[in-house]
Image (spheres, helix red, strand yellow):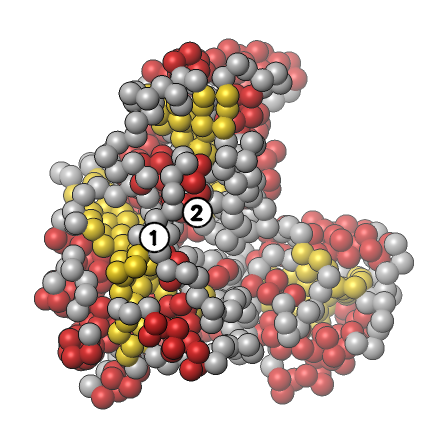
């Protein structure tokens, strides 16, 4: 029976995967992808069907765990934000070499305009060079429908499928009509066992097969019906839209677009359909969310006789998220009448919550380091990155997950002292533990501060992989237990905290300071839950 | 017929529960809806907004174009001003009058109020005070929704009230009642002050 639900794009995709017979979701939280896994964690279908839905330590472990599930013949979903693709890239690219057995769908949520991210990378490039098919829904309904087709496509062609969402699709709600739920797969092993051992002798054979397969995938992109060529009467221009860019185009043509439109939602790029457009139209405009992947392929090395407009020639902005306004301008339409911008507004940047433990930790750290002119602090990804802003200005670098302590190693070996790393508990278990092993083995003269709020805070308070075991992890990696210190970041403890930080900075070797106090957001939630339980 | 709405405020003020109720009512009435939200980093005390589009016809874009917003519903006066470029010349602004000051350079309140009044179709309402008057101090956002209901042509007040009853049902009868009282007080204020 069909039913209607009001769902985020993330939730539509999650429900589609559950209805497609999913056996496990594998993920590390990351905006804008987090809600996919959270939806599955709360779902009755997942509970009744024993669908795996615990968080993984990072995107690479998630991808590999999913690959193991696919090897066993079951359907697995991997979800991450775009930069998570970098973390799992080794596993992702090589999963094209092993291929899939049970359906394997990898969801990458890109964040154009960097609402909550450090770059604007476009995950479609990964599918392109891994020689993998990529699906990109243009609506929440398509996200629901497409994920089932992605699982089927993956199983039929023994290949993982990348599904690409962008922030606006992931975090926008619409009404979605859903269909029946189907069974999970039983355990069954691959028919092509050799390619799951990527020794060169096997991988070369597989590589030759992949370059043939990718041509078949391209043919499918022309014929499967997910890419639509919609003719128009005005052939002075043809328009190629990728994913949700189609919506911004149609927003500006409520009565139908006069130009032929190729609505792309499946890659590899269907060259036949593009050539048809080039033959029939005087120019081509490419409207794509993210980086100019399609436009670059179209332009090739030499310019074709057809004029190509897009992000590269300035018709559309080179960077940033698309919207109805920039697409309207690209189409040569005048802006709508509106009010002038207001005079009395100022930016309101995000800030650490009042009462947050990171605040107290930074206050104490700053108080100590003002006595050391040469101090450098290397920070990491999480709520505590907001400590760069006023009033703390607490560190000099933040690059990607785990880079704090490894950069502190490099700086300490260059002679920088004090060399201090600041990382959150979840980021530490995501990508910091191996770096700490390096620090111990190299006997780096540095101080690692783990600001432990017992959760993955920035993405809304998901479980953190090392909660309750951070000291043991540091001991196990080889840090001298005498130099693994725990402090409680509260204003009343500033003298104690500052003494400990100062002592460990002056220890010549690897020291770890764990500043531990629960995130005030999760603490509030836990207190409420306890109060309700008592009722 | 369509109505494009920008809901705005500061992270944590509760704009999303307003959206949830409008969404519930739209789904029930078979009205097309798209609603883009802000999650993640910006929720931490920064400015937040949600683009909510209602239409009797299918909706293309998740985002509202400059000049096509019909209604700004804001829990904070300066935040209402942030989006006036999206507002069409006949559009309405329904805003709370109480500023949320978590930045050092908040503009002069008098200037903010003057600029709001200049927009013409504006309802300015002290939602916290009204919520307290009707003994629903934690339902200020429902006072605002009630005020907005006076110009929300796509949905009738009774449909929104049904949404409130259903969305808050799991929290118990008392919570439903305080939210309904808040909504009604906001609606009455707006009817008198439009």
**Quadrant housing residue A120:** top right
Q: x%, y% of residue B116?
A: 36, 73
Q: Quadrant of the N terminus of chain A?
A: top left
Chain at numbered mark 2 = A
The answer to whether residue B185 is above or below residue A209 is below
Q: Quadrant of the C terminus of chain A?
A: bottom left
The residue identified by callout 1 is A337
If you read the primary sequence from the N terminus, does the residue marked by circle 1 or circle 2 appear first?
2
Residue at 23 percent across and 34 percent down: it is A255
**Quadrant housing residue A326:** top left
Looking at the rendered structure, the secondary structure element under dot 1 is loop
The answer to whether residue A241 is above or below residue A405 is above
Residue at 77 percent across and 57 percent down: it is A408
Camera-nearest residue between B161 and A64: B161
Q: How many marks?
A: 2
Q: Is residue A213 left or right of residue B136?
A: right
Q: x%, y% of residue A380?
A: 65, 58
Looking at the rendered structure, the secondary structure element under dot 2 is helix
Residue at 82 percent across and 55 percent down: it is A411
Residue at 44 percent across and 33 percent down: it is A287
The residue identified by callout 2 is A167
């Amino acid at each position: 029976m069909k039913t209607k639900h009001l769902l985020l794009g993330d939730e539509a995709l999650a429900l589609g995967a559950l209805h497609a017979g999913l056996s496990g979701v594998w993920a590390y939280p990351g905006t804008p992808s987090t809600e996919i896994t959270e939806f599955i964690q709360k779902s009755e279908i997942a509970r009744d069907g024993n669908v795996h839905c615990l968080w993984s330590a990072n995107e690479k472990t998630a991808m590999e765990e999913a690959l193991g599930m696919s090897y066993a013949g079951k359907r697995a979903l991997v979800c991450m934000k775009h930069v998570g693709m970098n973390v799992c890239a080794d596993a992702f690219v090589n999963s094209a070499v092993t291929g899939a057995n049970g359906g394997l769908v990898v969801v990458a949520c890109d964040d154009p305009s960097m609402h909550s991210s450090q770059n604007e990378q476009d995950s479609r490039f990964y599918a392109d060079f891994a020689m993998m098919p990529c699906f990109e829904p243009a609506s929440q309904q398509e996200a629901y429908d497409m994920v089932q087709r992605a699982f089927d496509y993956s199983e039929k062609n023994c290949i993982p499928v990348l599904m690409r969402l962008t922030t606006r699709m992931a975090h926008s709600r619409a009404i979605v009509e859903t269909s029946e739920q189907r069974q999970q797969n039983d355990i069954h092993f691959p028919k092509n066992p050799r390619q799951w051992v990527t020794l060169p002798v096997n991988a070369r054979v597989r590589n030759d097969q992949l370059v043939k397969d990718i041509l078949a995938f391209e043919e499918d992109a022309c014929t499967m019906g997910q890419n639509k060529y919609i003719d128009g009467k005005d052939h002075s221009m043809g328009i190629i839209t990728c994913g949700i860019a189609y919506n911004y185009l149609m927003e500006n043509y409520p009565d139908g677009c006069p130009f032929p439109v190729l609505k792309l939602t499946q890659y590899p790029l269907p060259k036949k359909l593009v050539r048809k457009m080039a033959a029939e139209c005087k120019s081509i405009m490419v409207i794509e969310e993210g980086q100019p992947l399609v436009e670059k392929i179209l332009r090739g090395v030499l310019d074709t006789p057809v004029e190509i407009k897009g992000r590269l020639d300035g018709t559309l902005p080179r960077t940033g998220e698309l919207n109805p306004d920039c697409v309207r301008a690209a189409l040569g339409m005048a802006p709508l009448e509106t009010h002038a911008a207001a005079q009395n507004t100022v930016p309101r940047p995000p800030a650490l919550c009042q009462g947050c433990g990171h605040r107290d930790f930074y206050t104490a750290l700053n108080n100590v380091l003002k006595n050391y002119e040469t101090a450098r602090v290397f920070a990491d990804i999480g709520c505590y990155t907001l400590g760069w802003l006023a009033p703390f200005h607490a560190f000099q670098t933040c690059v990607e997950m785990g880079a704090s302590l490894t950069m502190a190693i490099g700086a300490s070996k260059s002679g920088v002292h004090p060399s201090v790393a600041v990382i959150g508990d979840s980021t530490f278990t995501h990508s910091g533990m191996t770096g700490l092993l390096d620090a111990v083995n190299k006997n780096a003269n540095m101080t690692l501060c783990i600001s432990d709020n017992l959760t993955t805070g920035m993405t809304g308070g998901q479980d953190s992989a090392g909660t309750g075991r951070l000291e043991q992890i540091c001991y196990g990696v080889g840090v001298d237990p005498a130099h693994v210190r725990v402090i409680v970041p509260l204003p009343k403890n500033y003298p104690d905290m500052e003494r400990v930080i100062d002592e460990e900075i002056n220890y010549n070797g690897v020291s770890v300071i764990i500043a531990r106090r629960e995130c005030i957001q999760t603490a509030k939630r836990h207190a409420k839950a306890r109060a309700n339980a008592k009722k | 017929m369509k109505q494009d709405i920008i809901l705005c405020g500061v992270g944590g003020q509760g704009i999303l529960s307003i959206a949830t109720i409008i969404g519930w009512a739209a789904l029930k009435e078979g009205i097309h809806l798209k609603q883009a939200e802000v999650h993640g980093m910006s929720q931490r005390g920064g400015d937040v907004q949600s683009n909510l589009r209602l239409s009797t016809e299918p909706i293309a874009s998740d985002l509202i174009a400059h000049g096509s917003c019909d209604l700004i519903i804001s829990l904070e006066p300066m935040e209402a001003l942030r989006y006036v470029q999206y507002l069409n010349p006949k559009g309405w602004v329904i805003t709370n009058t109480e500023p949320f000051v978590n930045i050092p350079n908040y503009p002069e309140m008098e200037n903010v109020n003057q600029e709001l009044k200049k927009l013409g179709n504006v309802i300015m309402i002290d939602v916290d005070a009204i919520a307290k008057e009707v003994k629903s101090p934690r339902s200020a956002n429902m006072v605002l929704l009630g005020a907005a209901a006076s110009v929300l042509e796509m949905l009738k007040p009774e449909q929104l009230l049904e949404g409130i009853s259903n969305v808050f049902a799991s929290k118990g009868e008392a919570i439903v009642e305080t939210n309904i009282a808040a909504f009604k007080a906001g609606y009455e204020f707006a009817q008198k002050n439009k």
